[in-house]
Amino acid sequence: MKSSFFEQMENIPLPDTNWGTPLRDVLTDADFQLELGEINKKLEGLLRSEGLSYKRPYSEIIKEIGGNISENRLETWKKFFQELGLLWVKDGEIAITEFGRILNSSHDSILEQLDRGRRNIAEAAVGVLGRQQLRNPSTKNRDYPEDCDVLPYRSIWLAIHKLGWLHWEELHRVILKVMRSDQLNSAIEKIESARSNTDYDPQDSSSAQKYLGDAVYSDSSQAARRMTPWFSGAGFGGLLIDREPNKGCRSFTDLGAALIPKELASDRTWIDFEDDQQAWIDYLNEAVLPGSKSSPETSKKLTAVIGEDDQVLIEAKKLLFDDQVGGVLFVGPPGTGKSWYARQVAIALSLGNADCIREVQFHPSYQYDDFVEGYAPDGEKGFKLVDRHLLQMSARARERDTPVVMVIDEFSRTDPARVLGETLTYMEGSMRDVVFHLPSGRLASIPSNLLFLATMNPEDRSVDEIDDAMDRRWAKIHLKPDRNKLKEFLIENGASGTVIGATLKFFSELQEHIEIGHAFFRKVKDTQSLERVWSTQIQHISNKRHRFDTSKQEAIKEIWEKCAAALSEKEEASSGEKLEKEQ
């Protein structure tokens, strides 16, 4: 019996001078991103418009909704959502009902869960794809050279990591020809050298031929399609690498940029599994299975970016060890690095043991049952009482002599006193290791080596205020917007002196009206990226924070307009000088 068409195609040997295409047929971009159908965009905008004046021409509300919507259409949508009991107009301003708040917070909660799910999948994908080998037991029918030791997805990652982005022609004409790992750096340098030429344009086949070399596939339209499966594989759809190319160029997504460099820092080399399929699959499984020899939960060693002389770390240690506070809260406006610092301090305190750190994130629907103890299905149509994060990490701490750390992100997005319950009392230094009763009747205690760190935005209105009992047991470390750190970001990003000066001035003047953290500007490298930070983030934060004070909104807008005008003048002057030189 003849084999199927696809089996016949799969058995055609690939040339031994390039990677070929991962599949004999050409695939469109796969998509493994978890997506949620958004609630109506008009409703989202109206919910964000709470407190704004509902009076023609509705300019502020239309701005929140985005897009081009007429005044009559806006009124129609408002009436519809009002009839659903989601919002109304009170004293001439948009007001949100309790039903509207529930819908909004529940939607936010689902998005947060999806974000966590995406990260879990992305972490697993990076672990497995980073091990993939061009030559392995499942590709033995392909005529790769005996000395081929390429890890293809890792090679694509390294090229993007070093170059910032990768065009499909650069993959096609250069990276695809790398058949040994010791050729990869030279291949990346060849692309870097090509880009140094002012007339280099990978979109132009003659330019690509001149600077990158011969094509693997002579039909350029076919070549572009045949590169898609490689990008789709390396990016796990659009999870790690942008799914939509920018003029043929691909770069890391935020998740990819956060996770892939860590994998590239690991020592990963080709392994000869011969024909042993099971050993090959076991090797891939090791990247994600708990308890395996390379599982992050049991063996991963983390290194803190901050040193022992870091002032925030020193202060946290004094509070936790000398003053024996129940926990340390990193407090500050958005973008000041609270979550980043909490993780870095956790790594330092735990001596880099990944299994001694547990991160959780509070949200409006978070409960005691999620954090301390609760019931879960037992698999036999019933329920059983199970330990949640706090009790799990308490048990782990009792097994260790070194510190175990819990990091609670977004501490004030729920009611912390409700979530912690009676355990709040026993977090206090003097009450550690004291046995107490849980609501279930079980006995518990919190070990002295279980440390608590948390982050909180004081502007978060999810709860009115942290109660006195919480204040007494949790010490606060305030993180402020840092001009020097912003300057470091700009220099690292290769921003021009003009952009650096304008951005720093804009940042400093902003602080007089609204505290905005330096992290908002971490990707700024030119005028366009600075404009995006203003239009997509800072402007909206300003309008929301000062929704009842239009004079402050206007003052902040004027600061931006002065900054934009200064940049425009500099660019025009620079263009004029360049033109004069050319003439």
Image (cartoon, rainbow, N blue to C red):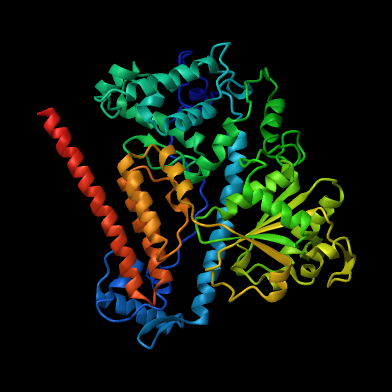
Q: Position of residue 445 (x, y in %)?
A: 86, 62
| Residue 383 position in % (x across, y down) | 80, 65
- Is 144 positioned to the left or the right of 276 in the image? left
Q: Is residue 139 above or below residue 577?
A: above
Residue farthest bottom in this picture: 91
Q: Nearer the viewer, residue 203 or 277?
A: 203
Quadrant location of the C terminus in the rendered image: top left
Q: Position of residue 344 (x, y in %)?
A: 64, 46
Q: Nearer the viewer, residue 575 or 14?
A: 575
Residue at horizontal 31%, vertical 37%? 247
Q: In the rendered view of the protein, which quadrant contains the N terminus?
A: top right
Whether residue 173 is visible to the viewer of this picture, yes or no, is no
Instruction: Residue 479: name its quadrant.
Output: bottom right
Provide residue 325's location: percent of width, then percent of height: 75, 62
Look at 61% across and 47% down and name the residue there: 120
Query: From what the image shows, is residue 365 above or below residue 568?
Result: below
Query: Can the viewer see residue 326?
Result: yes
Q: In the displayed image of the protein, which residue is found farthest to the top?
A: 146
Q: Looking at the image, which is closer to me, 165 or 429?
A: 429
Name the residue at 33% across, 21% down.
Answer: 194
Position of residue 418 relative to residue 508, above or below, is below
